[in-house]
Image (cartoon, rainbow, N blue to C red):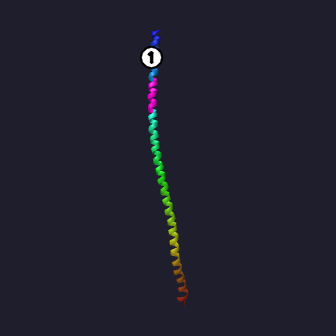
């Protein structure tokens, strides 16, 4: 009967050791999950901030492109009008003043 009691006590100790190891592993895993969750939240915040800055930059580029197009359109008109007058005057000069 003593052998049976000793075997039972040995099994009980092994079960307790296994439970202790399991609790320790659970605690470590829980800690790792919390650390990783914090890392992911930080990465998410950084990504959202970066995304917002990209959207602001995109808006600035679109505005700059619009102003460039307006500038080129205006300058093209402003240059063509006097140049057409000069060319017209040149044609008139050739036909009327320089004609033999």
Measuring from the top left, give residue 68's x and y in whole percent: 50, 66
Measuring from the top left, give residue 85's x and y in whole percent: 53, 80
- Residue 58 appearing in the image: yes
Q: In this view, does 89 lie above or below 78?
A: below
Measuring from the top left, give residue 52's x and y in whole percent: 48, 53
Circle 1 SS class: helix
Taking the magenta stretch, the answer to whether it contains residue 24 is yes
Residue at numbered disc 1? 10
Q: Residue at x 48, y 60 (%)?
A: 60
Residue 85 vs residue 21, the one in the foreground: 21
Residue 80 vs residue 20, the one in the foreground: 20
Looking at the rendering, the stretch of residues picked out in magenta corresponds to 18-28
Taking the magenta stretch, the answer to whether it contains residue 97 is no
Instruction: Decide: few, some or many residues near mark 1? Use Cα within 10 Å; few <14, some 14-19, many ≥20.
Output: few
Quarter holding the C terminus is bottom right
Q: Which residue is drawn at 47% across and 21% down?
A: 15
Specify the farthest residue to the top: 1
Specify the farthest residue to the bottom: 100
Q: In this view, does 48 lie above or below 95?
A: above
Residue 91 vs residue 26, the one in the foreground: 26
Q: Which residue is drawn at 53% across and 89% down?
A: 97
Residue 49 vs residue 80, the one in the foreground: 49
- Residue 98 appearing in the image: no
Measuring from the top left, give residue 83's x and y in whole percent: 51, 78
Q: In this view, does 64 lie above or below 77?
A: above
**Would you say the magenta stretch is mainly helix, strand or loop?**
helix
Question: How many callouts does the rendering have?
Answer: 1
Q: Which residue is drawn at 50% across and 55% down?
A: 55
Specify the farthest residue to the right: 95
């Amino acid at each position: 009967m003593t052998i049976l009691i000793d075997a039972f006590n040995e099994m009980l100790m092994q079960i307790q050791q296994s439970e202790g190891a399991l609790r320790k592993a659970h605690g470590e895993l829980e800690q790792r999950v919390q650390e990783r969750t914090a890392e992911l939240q930080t990465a998410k915040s950084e990504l959202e901030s970066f995304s917002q800055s990209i959207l602001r930059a995109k808006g600035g580029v679109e505005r700059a492109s619009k102003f460039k197009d307006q500038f080129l359109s205006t300058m093209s008109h402003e240059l063509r009008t006097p140049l057409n007058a000069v060319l017209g005057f040149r044609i008139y000069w050739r036909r009327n003043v320089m004609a033999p």
